[in-house]
Amino acid sequence: MHKLTGMLTLGAITMMLAIAGNAADRISDFSLIDHHGKFHQLSRYADHDAVVLISHLRGDRDSRRALDAFNELTSDFADRDIAFFVLDSSGETDKTILGKDAERNGVEVPVLMDDTRLVAKQLGLNHAAEVVILDPESRERVFKGVINNRFAAEGRSRRASEHYAADALRQVLSGAQPDAPALASGADAIEFDLDAGISYAEDIVPILERRCVSCHNEGGIAPFAMTNHQIVQGWSPMIREVLYTKRMPPGQIDNDYVRDFKEVSHITVEETQTLVQWIDEGAHFDGGKDPLPGLQPELVKWSYGEPDLVLPIPAQQIPATGVQDYRNLTVPLPIEEDIWVKAVEFEAGDPTVLHHIIAFAYGPDGLNEFEVLNQGIGLGAYAPGNEINTYPEGAGFPLKAGGGLFLQMHYTTSGRETVDASEVALYLWDEDPERTVFGGSAAEWQIDIAPHSRQEMTAAKTFRQDVYLSMLGPHMHYRGYDARFRLIHPDGESEEILNVPNYQFNWQKVYDFKEPLFVQAGSKLEFSGTFDNTETNPFNPDASQTLSWGEQTWQEMFFGFFRYVEAGPGE
Ligand code: HEC
């Protein structure tokens, strides 16, 4: 299929015999964010002929000059199906700085933020100005060495006369074994400032407790429980992989926005380094008493607290197989007087089949009464990892006596017949709140995605009055790749307010602002995202399909949901 792949299978033996330090080491999959906040995962370049990276240290002179040679390399091979990257391993975490650096150096390819330096370490890049060529399909490293002899540590020449990386790439593309010398560069060394002697009890357990155990516990939603050292050690190769690929903790967003939202999944650079280093050293227990068994969270049914009202949802029979249409259920409210909801929590009956619930309100005269309030995801929604819905301080959702909840239920079959008996809990305001919470969405229904393609899409919504935004929730299906929200202020200035680089359909996260965001009348909320309908999308059920809008998961949707309250005069 691909030249490089053919070469690798045929040339496997040659590879084994290869000298010059270029033996084909297999690289574990990894994911990094680039200077635009875009997500790149090595395995998602499996359809390319090669992936080529140059190690870079911002501020190092040689490194900067080597980028000129790298730019030349990228343009020389521009007509080939090669993914080029600059790998910034200076530890810089500010995308703007990386972007300016790229611009100054004329770099047009993505600059990957290797903030943990774990990727450089894995690729064997010890200095700036070194190039690695990877076969993205087998994930073998087929070349590593200084880009040209001008930057070689030994036998350095004033002018570049030997273009090692270009030679190697040409050989690789023609199916030959690269014989260019794998020399080290004389540019600055990449610092792998990882601590030695990591303690399981003192260093590892606190990280697991902070970042993982809330789901990975007995009775939790994750497939294994971190209940003692042995289990963690047994899973450690997988843990390493999910950290390298940023799959766990799930639903990570761009670091720039972690501080703005409540309860986002996050893990720091140091925590990731510590975990991976510990695993690489054998994931040992350094003795004493294992603190992990004592840290298992207490299982409570309603994590938001004791509810004021619990509404059982009529039990649903779910067959073992087959496509399930949305089920629309109504649940009357057992109340005599109108109420104001403060928060909503869902308890999934059978999480293996319950895909989502969206709760809307109806009044004694039906759904129409709630037309405005039911915009977006209305009163609240359930998706795995998103059980609790809260509103901004002092805001509520009114419900009427004689009315009830209208629930849109979506099930996916699991191969096993089951019954789902889910519940909704309502938390109420004691006194009428000052504000009403509204929902909405920036959406696009005209979806037409070609087979084997990637496509970007944008939808927008204009606010007619001053509001406070309190929640953002991107929604696409299996082809969703990334998602962003921007505010276009009335003066035309565009401001990014959330970037979800690695959108994952399985984690329908919504993001609640810690402090609701003031939005001036006339501003536009813009939702943009990318659909990935190629084979390299691991979630794609069928890349040969043309996609249009549809309720089922293999069809597509494009919603940027939000919640807001109206701002009072003079606020
Ligand atoms: C919000 C809940 C949640 C948190 C927090 C979380 N996980 Fe997970 N984890 C899951 C779920 C659910 C799965 C299975 C589905 C999936 O892979 O998305 C999973 C899967 C995994 C797997 C892969 C299992 C497999 O067989 O593929 C590993 C390894 C893992 N988690 C490690 C971690 C580590 C390490 C952390 C902390 C740094 C963590 N998880 C944090 C919920 C969570």
Image (tube, grey):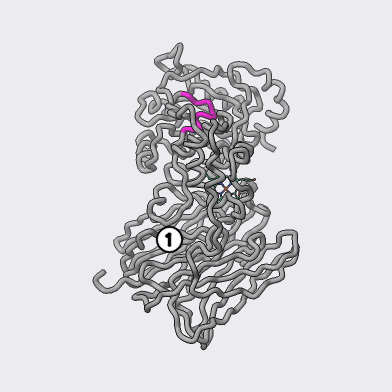
Where residue 191 sits: x, y (%)? 42, 27
Where residue 444 sits: x, y (%)? 51, 65
Question: Residue visible at 41% across and 21% down?
Answer: 187
Quarter of the rendering occupied by the C terminus: bottom left
247 over 105 or under it: above or below? below
Q: Is residue 367 visible in this depiction of the protein? A: no
- Tell which of 437 and 215 is nearer to you: 215
Where residue 541 sits: x, y (%)? 67, 54
- Tell which of 66 and 520 is nearer to you: 520
Q: Is residue 4 visible in this depiction of the protein? A: yes
Q: Which residues are magenta?
A: 117-126
Give the residue at mark 1: 512
Name the residue type under label 1: Asp
Quarter of the rendering occupied by the N terminus: top right
Examine the structure image and report whether residue 526 is included in the region drawn in magenta: no
- Tell which of 480 and 7 is nearer to you: 480
Examine the structure image and report whether residue 118 is included in the region drawn in magenta: yes
Q: Which corner quadrant of the image does residue 553 belong to?
A: bottom right
Main SS of residues in magenta: helix
